[in-house]
Amino acid sequence: MEALDITSILLVLAAAFGYINLKTFKLPTTIGIMLFGVIFSLLLLAVSPLFPELPGQAKSFLESIDFNKTLMEGMLSYLLFAGALHVNLSDLKEQKSLVAMLASFGVVFSTFVIGGATYYILGWLGVAAPFIWCLVFGALISPTDPVAVLGILKKAGAPKSLETKITGESLFNDGVGVVVYLVLIGMIPLTAAHGHADDHHATEMTAGAITKLFAIEAGGGILWGLLLGAIGFYLLKSVNNYQIEILISLALVTAGYRAAYAMHLSGPLAMVVAGLMIGNQGRYLAMSDSTREHLDTFWELIDEMLNAVLFLLIGIELLILEWTTTAIIFGLIAIPLTLAVRFIAASIPVTILRKTREFSPRVITILTWGGLRGGISIALALGMPKDPEFMDIRNLLLVATYIVVIFSIAVQGLSLKTLIERSLRNSKS
């Protein structure tokens, strides 16, 4: 199927589901589109006895879309840049210690605790999963998704400091999570080839690979983002024409992200850093009022459209998953597991930093419940190796990821505003 045909179908479905949601349930747009995507998928499965060709055609359509490549190599660059564009750098600096700890220690801690728990839970369920695959699941489910969080926080009425904590962490920790994920994915052939790799050797390999990847991918991505931001700032400051300035920002994101990918640097981190620079120094020192207004409108529109398509894809991906009883059981167990580990990962840095600063009431609870998982987790799960020897394990982890993400967005996302409002009322009483 041609790319334009795929795009047309996705836009029609996103517009239709968005319209129906607006006229009926009035849920947040992205969540509403995702839930209608899930309902649409279930309806296709329900009518399969009457129209047996429909689910097959829908599945073929979805299989023609590489979700991992579409998000990680394309859409994510625009979404992260648009999100970072509206984050105040001064506010972020005030929360830098907590954001840094959550986006680094939090992700690594969560990866290994969830991975270890997954190994024992799957063993209890009678699934002999290699430990490295369990760690991969821990890595892909640990990062909170900025795409899922940003839209909800805009309407949740959260205090600025709390919004900055959650948004800042979400923007940075996916880059860290992807690096950890790539290290672990790179070790799968090692353990698969030797059956049971020597634990000490594997640990040394992991430590060395993590150090190298963090230095090259994460560090290099941040430096590349600084360079892109500096180039963008100079170009924007040298002209006063909003059409050209919007075009410059679009070129910066598109070419900059692709260049990062070609240089094996972290494109997500580069886009976050570039977005922060353009949205702060660039906004106040290099743009006229007219440019600021048009640039903000343009990137908000890009953000809304891509979010709509992304959450639609999350909803209808249900059709291509291989559902088994074991996978569903593990997915349901994984929901409280990820929440419990998130609670611990948030508690540790907050407890440490509480000695030197104050936090808003119930901050750990809100950070836990507001740590939504989204499209990035599904994209990474779909990027797991398709090794014939481990396809059952891969499919099980993919279904579990989907269950956690749907719960996270639908249940946590819809109730986050209520939780924040209740916390604010209690703090005032």
Image (spheres, rainbow, N blue to C red):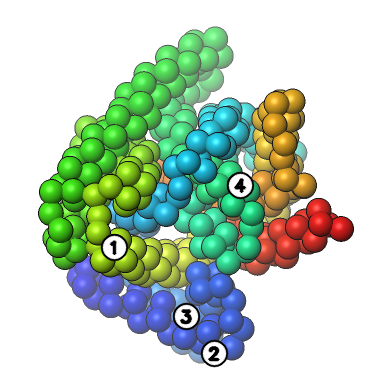
Q: Residue furthest toward the right?
A: 429
Query: Which residue is pictured at 68% across the width and 37% down the height?
Result: 346
Foreground mark, 2 or 4, reads 4
Query: Which residue is pictured at 71% across the width and 40% down the height?
Result: 359
Q: Is residue 247 above or below residue 141?
A: below
Three-letter code, disc 3:
Gly
Label 2 environment density (alpha carbons within 10 Å; few <14, some 14–19, many ≥20): few
Q: Work out how far the residue at label 1 is from the one at label 4, CA to CA, in angstroms.
A: 26 Å
Quarter in which the C terminus is drawn: bottom right
Query: Which residue is pictured at 22% across the width and 44% down the height?
Result: 233
Q: Residue 165: which quarter of the image?
A: top right
Residue 371 in sight in this render: no
Q: Position of residue 360 (x, y in %)?
A: 72, 45
Quarter in which the N terminus is drawn: bottom left
Three-letter code, disc 2:
Lys
Mark 1 or mark 4: whose residue is earlier in sequence = 4
Q: Residue 199: which quarter of the image?
A: top right
Residue topped by disc 1: 289
Element at label 3:
helix
Element at label 1:
helix
Q: Position of residue 374 (x, y in %)?
A: 52, 55
Residue topped by disc 3: 18
Q: Work out how far the residue at label 1 is from the one at label 2, CA to CA, in angstroms.
A: 35 Å
Residue topped by disc 2: 23
Query: Which residue is pictured at 34% across the width and 63% down the height?
Result: 296
Circles 2 and 3: CB distance less than 8 Å?
A: no
Foreground mark, 1 or 3, reads 1
Task: Please tell me how many numbered marks the rendered image carries.
Answer: 4
